[in-house]
Amino acid sequence: MDSQPSRFAAHAANGAPAPGARFTGLADYYFIGGNNDPTQIPTDMLAKAAADVIKRDGHLIAIYNMGLGPLGYPPLRQFVADKMARHRGITAGGENILITTGSNQGIDLVVAAMLNPGDVVVLEEHCYASSITRFKKAGATIIPVKLDDDGIVMDDLAQILAAQKAAGKPVKMIYTIPTVQNPTGSIMPMDRRVRMVELAREHDVLIFEDECYADLIWAGDGPAAIYALAPERTVHIGSFSKTLAPALRLGYATGDWEIIGRMAALKSDGGTGALDQMIACEFFSKYFDQHVESLSKVLKDKLDTMIEAVEAEFGTHMQLFKPKGGIFLWMKLPDGVDVRKLIAPAAKAGIVFNPGPEWSLLGDGAKSHLRLCFALNSKENIREGVAQFARVCFEEMGIPPRSRNVANAAG
């Protein structure tokens, strides 16, 4: 049937993408996406949590939104409020927390509630790919702001805000991932957070703070969230995808009711999955800190394994931006290398990775960058995959020199 011409092609909506390829399974070395470690899913405890909460509250699934309104399961919203108070310095009641179907829905709802086509938005020059896509789709005018090892360079942000104001096209929103930035893994220090708030107040700019990875920091909780410093002009989103499981599709947003109420009104999905909310709440209310501490140790160990493998295989030919948390390693090959030319040959070798230009507003300026996820694969698989990727890079680009790899192969 697939080989026959389809009448649907001629009737597809303008701008609709071509049909995606049929799924044939994950690659042998699957270094893309925000996946987690399968061995760290607490299946036994989740099973008990599911049994307990379904017995107690299972009757609620008979009604859309569990008959509890569009904000989500109240015990989960209260857990989020308590967690943010303990770890992010945020004071927010459960009544100002919206449970979303993953953090991506949170981004969609903020964009829909707050932006008009043509509004000026500042994004970090290297940024979450799905956020870039969503802001572009909304018709926003996007301006990249420089990053260094500590996140946004505040002098550059100040210049952008002043220049846009002088041009009569003021910035409406700053979208930032300050705590374990995606893809670079940096954490913005407190002095920069304070400066950002000062600039936002001076220029009357909204701050959209994405903290999907803030629970996974190697050295404790990190600085307080920007929302804690400026709740009157910040909307804050987070996720359970990285601390528990991405397939659960659970996220949350908090902010002033002027925005949370609008987001709730736009959330027309009939409610985020009730069982997901109830089970996650039952488990995390008892074991969140214990689980995250254990998971973070495993992830840090895998990161160390990936760094060791990359340094061994590529030496000085790969620049590493060592993350302070999360599940990704951002890196850069020499300037002459275009990683997009490695996608097909790497795939033939069973390797998939995220090319830099998809995670950057710099276009060709990020052509030598790439992102690898270290959470999903075993340490043995990480070592094998990095070695295979080094072989592909040499065969296609002549980098890195083969002496190390030849020695490995001979051994």
Image (cartoon, grey):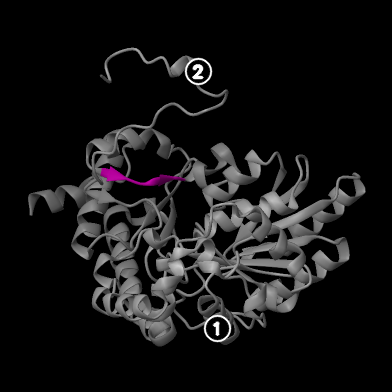
Residue 200: percent from the left, percent from the top?
A: 80, 65
Is 87 magenta? The answer is no
- Kindly tell me whether residue 354 is visible in this rendering: yes
Residue closest to the eye, 241 or 186: 241
Q: Residue at x 72, y 42 (%)?
A: 140
Residue 376 as seen in the image, left or right of residue 134: left
Residue 243 as seen in the image, left or right of residue 180: left
Residue closest to the eye, 297 or 157: 297
Residue 378: percent from the left, percent from the top?
A: 22, 63
Residue closest to the eye, 62 or 91: 62
Residue marked by disc 1: 87
Front tag of 1 and 2: 2
Q: Is residue 303 above or below residue 269?
A: below
Q: Quadrant of the N terminus?
A: top left
Q: Residue at x 48, y 45 (%)?
A: 356
**Sequence-wise, which precedes: disc 1 or disc 2?**
2
Tell me the element at label 2.
helix
Residue 120: percent from the left, percent from the top?
A: 77, 47
Residue closest to the eye, 218 or 139: 139
**Magenta stretch: dominant secondary structure:** strand
Residue marked by disc 2: 11
Circle 2 residues within 10 Å: few <14, some 14–19, many ≥20: few
Q: How many numbered markers are drawn?
A: 2
Spatial CA distance of label 1 from label 2 is: 51 Å
Residue 173: percent from the left, percent from the top?
A: 75, 56
- Kindly identify the amino acid type of the residue bearing the numbered disc 2: His
What stretch of residues is rendered in magenta? Answer: 351-355
